[in-house]
Image (cartoon, helix red, strand yellow):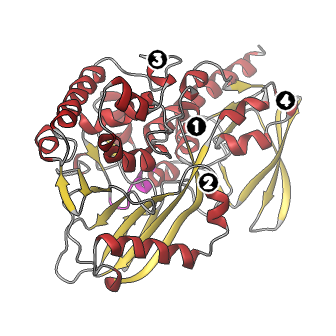
Amino acid sequence: MVGAGLSGLTSAYHLREHRVLVLEAGKVPGGVCRQGSFRGLAYPAGSAYFYYPGDPSWEAWYRDLGLPLADSAVAKPVSALFYGGRWYPDCFSKPCIQTLPLPRRAINGLENLAENLAAWEEVWDPMGSDSLPNPELDRMSLAHFLEHEQQLPPQVTSILAPYCRSCLGAGPETVSAWAGLFFLMSEFSANSRTAAFPGGNAMIAQALAQSLSPPVRCGQTLVRLEPAPQGVDLLVWDSPENRGYRLQAGAVILALGKFAARHILPAHAGWELEVFSRFRYSSYVVAALCGHISLESPGYENWIVGDENFSDFIMSPRTPRGDEARVMTVFAPQPYGQSREALLRMQPEEKAKELLTAVERHFPGTAREVEEIHLYRFGHAQIVPYPGFLTTLKGNIAQAQERVILANSDLEGLPCIEAAIVQGQKAAQRARTLLAENRAGV
């Protein structure tokens, strides 16, 4: 297993009956599921929440990992919108939509959209499928769908922009209408429930990693893959030991983003490598503002309209408790396009100052309460489901060839932990089938 993000760890978990070795280039497993700590207070340093499973098999999966699912449901209001200097709690609910400072036509249109999403929720179940319901929605941007198909004014698009940037890597004018509506479905839904553990989704990754024997081997970078008579040869660089070594495996799962996998896959492995150029990525920064922060915000996830520097934040703990330390985790998707190159030209101190200035602009007095700033995911890639990408993706990319299997949420085209888990489960099943065929001499 190459990559100890959520897809790789899930695959390894489901293949525990085999001899599985997990290699991770980073210092710790978990991928974007990271946890930070400030004076003993755990906070999300990356992927922060998931959706409480409505399916019994998903619920059993979390419980089998020993995760406290019953305690994970996030209290309402889950989402709040900061718009024009005012908070709008429970911003995706019908009562709140009525209070938004929008023309009546826009409010009626948003209510109609919410009703449509509730109806689609009953029939859309595309995760892990090779087809998309309503594929015509993937051929247009979310902004086009809202402003032309639904005849909604641009103010509605701007209200949804921070959500799209944070969850989908780019604004409504760039992301597919299908992807945007699929994500918004869970926000407008009366049935879905947001869930979170202390420290975010790192607890899920930690539970998966702790179930594995041998443990995840960190600081290991895959340099090359080559076919071998009995499997696959791997050339690996061991960073802690400053040396290279070889391994042989009956099968290899590459649980990596496709921007990385395309450079590792051998040309003769069977993939048309140029297909991976269709995967497009945005760039991301997460900043933890640590101190005795007194800011009161109504939601668990708090969305900021109209700021290019950051899109949303989460407070840990959610409400101030006397003089206890708190952490404001600020999510800062970078402008889509050439943002990663521009970001990497910056010094971390410069970026931290930029984000703190942006927060202070909306919430005066916060800056003087911040004692430390911790930066994470500095330039980390996030898949962008642009118009047409999901249609191209479904069924058009072989996910296993020459004893090499691809995983990662990229292959769902949706940057969420449920997509990563599904891809991990699918990769494990492909590996199990392949190894069984090997034993049978097929």
Give amino acid for label 2. Val
| Circle on res. 388 | none
Say which element carries label 1: helix
Whether pointer 1 and pointer 3 mark residues with C-beta atoms closer than 8 Å, the reply is no
Q: Position of residue 419 (x, y in %)?
A: 48, 35
| Circle on res. 410 | 1
Q: Which residue is mark 3?
A: 136
Q: Quadrant of the C terminus?
A: top right
The one nearer the camera, 122 or 58, is 122
Say which element carries label 2: loop
- Residue 79 lies within the magenta run: no
Task: Report crowding for label 2: few under 14, some 14 to 19, many 20 or more residues within 10 A (C-alpha).
Answer: many
Give amino acid for label 1. Asp
Say which element carries label 3: helix
Q: Which residue is mark 4?
A: 230
The CA span between labels 1 and 4 is 29 Å
Q: Which residue is mark 2?
A: 216
At horizontal 62% and vertical 75% (from top left) the residue drawn is 347
Whether pointer 2 and pointer 1 mark residues with C-beta atoms closer than 8 Å, the reply is no
Q: Horizontally, is 43 left or right of 376 in the view?
A: left
The one nearer the camera, 31 or 163, is 163
Say which element carries label 4: loop
Q: Quadrant of the N terminus?
A: top right
Q: Nearer the viewer, mark 3 or mark 4?
A: 3
- Residue 201 lies within the magenta run: yes
Q: Is residue 176 above or below residue 168?
A: above
Give amino acid for label 4. Gln
Q: Nearer the viewer, mark 3 or mark 2?
A: 3
